[in-house]
Amino acid sequence: MERELLHRFFEGKTSYQEEKIIRRWIETSDANHAHFLRERRLYDALLLTDGKASLKRKKITISTFGIISTTAAVMLVLIIGGIYLYGLRDKSEQYNTILVPAGQRINLVLSDNTNLWLNANTTFRYPTEFSKKNRTVYLDGEAYFEVSKNEKKPFVVKTAQGDIHVTGTSFNLESYSKHQSFVTSLFEGGVDVYRNEEKVVSLNPNEKSTLKSNELIVSKITDTDPYLWRKGLIAFNKENLENILLSLEKYFDVDIQINPLNLPQHTYTGKFRQSDGVDYALKVLQKSIRFKYERDETTNIIHIK
């Protein structure tokens, strides 16, 4: 297998057909699989040599293509499997910014032992050490938080659409500025949802708030499949094609152009692995819902017909 092709795969720049070729090659023999892992380690090592200064040591676990890569030293500019981590200085506080590319996710443990997962196309900014007054982080995308309890120091997540205040709890937050989404789903404890610096709603376990027409609507969580993304799965339960395409657009960072009036009105229930890519998901959908699509590799635009 050509090294250039494997490196483009690590960067998330291969086509659907190229990904199929690589997967088939890996599954052919143990020797191929071992070669793939060696090439991945070499790729990561080459990137690490570009770092210029080491920062505070952190533990980061990255999931890509079923492989878990761990690094202890966080560099000033660190790229692991296409996931970017920058060390930034902001007055007296030092921040890291993580950018998770399409089709991938990352597990991160913060300095207060808060555990979180970051979904595809997410940007997450956090201090290397929290201040004495609060624990404030910044999110553009989707994350699942398991916040360590500290009633004297609230944990605050700031987004473009609103903020979340907690002291210790488990919740999922989706807030992609590009798609103007803002959905908070609570599983344990309690959260307060703020907009324009004012508390709007407080959630109880198994409740979620969704921003619709500039208003937060509170409802019960009746389906947990949407949160399977932490396991690398994109799940749909009796969802119409338009909403499915919007989700694929969000997770795979592609532009899907549709005409809602021409779309089939059938619903779909099923699961996809993020690592399979958008083309695989569309081909599986075509088996249940009749539609055609064309993908422009140059512009990364998918036209649904």
Image: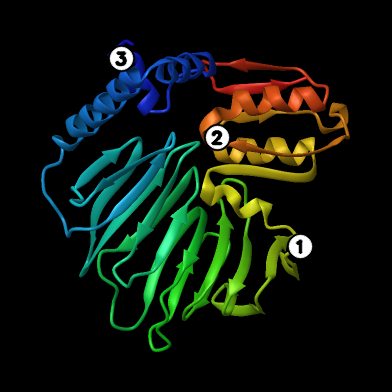
Question: Mark 2 sits on what residue?
Answer: 252
Q: CA distance from mark 2 to mark 1?
A: 26 Å
Answer with left or right where residue 182 lies relative to residue 134: right
Instruction: Name the secondary structure under disc 3.
Output: helix
Colour setup of the view: rainbow
> Going 34% across and 70% down the picture, which residue do you hit?
113
Taking depth in this image into account, of 4 and 52 the one nearest to the observer is 4
Q: Residue at x 57, y 62 (%)?
A: 172
Q: Quadrant of the N terminus?
A: top left
- The label shown at residue 222 is 1
Q: Badge 2: few (under 14), some or many (20 or more) residues near its Cα, within 10 Å?
A: some
Of badges 2 and 3, the one in the foreground is 3
Label 2 secondary element: helix
| Image coordinates for residue 223, horizontal then vertical, percent | 73, 58
Q: Nearer the viewer, residue 155 or 226?
A: 226
Q: What residue sits right under mark 3 in the picture?
A: 4
Name the residue furthest bottom: 152
> Does the CB distance between marks 1 and 3 fall below 8 Å?
no
